[in-house]
Image: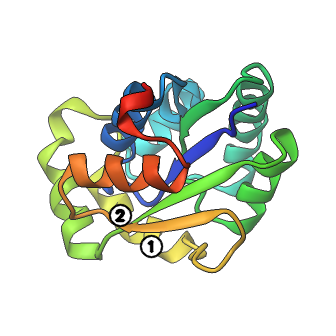
Amino acid sequence: MTDSLVIMGVAGCGKSSLGAAVAQATGLALVEGDDFHSPASRAKMSQGIALTDADRDGWLTTLGEQLRAHPDGLVLTCSALKLSYRERLRQAAPGLRFVFLGIGREQAQARVAARAAAHFFSTTLVDSQFATLEDPTGEAGVLRVDALKPLDQLQADVTAWLGLDKEQA
């Protein structure tokens, strides 16, 4: 059985890009966590209003259901900013691993601003993401990577950590 993996971090760190690259390299299904936000949550974020734990509750339940629906493994992109959120996801998928894309506030802000026309997430929320983030470095099953590394290097680092070679895909 293949372990599932969450690509996590603050807005703008590159979750979607790395998630797609890892899914392609491993042959695992990709689930984009943002696709499961409620219309109300999307509206709040587009207006620059940070989500609360209550806003995220149903979303985390749905993501847990996605993990359970893919027993052969899954690459899930999800901010997973708080330990309590990560624990909920771990309950849904024992052995779940996380790749934490570390990035500085300025770089995240620039990336979110660059995609503003094509994404619902408001640039004004980057600070709230950093305020909410409980750094997972040191938790079991977490790999921290530098979000500013080239995508192909990040994908190679993750698949090596998972114990997979690119040639297996």
Q: Secondary structure at mark 2?
A: helix
Q: Position of residue 67 (x, y in %)?
A: 73, 30
Relative to 127, residue 89 above or below = above
Q: Residues within 10 Å of mark 1 (few under 14, many from 20)?
A: some
Whether residue 88 is visible, yes or no, is: yes
Looking at the figure, which quarter contains the C terminus? top left
- Residue at x 67%, y 63% (from the top left corner): 141
**Front residue (pair 75, 10):** 75
Relative side of 163 to 147, left or right: right
- Number of residues whose C-alpha sits closer than 10 Å to that of mark 2, classed few (under 14), some (14–19) or many (20 or more): many
Q: Is any atom of residue 112 visible in this view? A: no
Q: Are marks 2 and 1 in contact (CB under 8 Å)?
A: yes
* Left or right, 118 with reference to 82: left
Quarter of the figure with residue 19 = top left
Residue 86 location, quadrant: bottom right
The image shows residue 4 at horizontal and vertical percentages of 66, 38
- Tell me how far mark 2 sits from mark 1, CA to CA: 7 Å
Q: Residue at image x 72%, y 41%?
A: 60
Residue type at tag 1: Phe
Number of marks in the image? 2
Q: Is residue 29 above or below residue 125?
A: above
Which residue is at the front of the view, 21 or 106?
Answer: 21
User: Which label number is shown at residue 130?
Assistant: 1
Q: Amino acid at mark 2?
A: Val
Q: Residue at x 69, y 33 (%)?
A: 2
Q: Is residue 146 left or right of residue 35?
A: left
Residue drawn at (84%, 39%) of the image: 92
- Residue ID for mark 2: 126
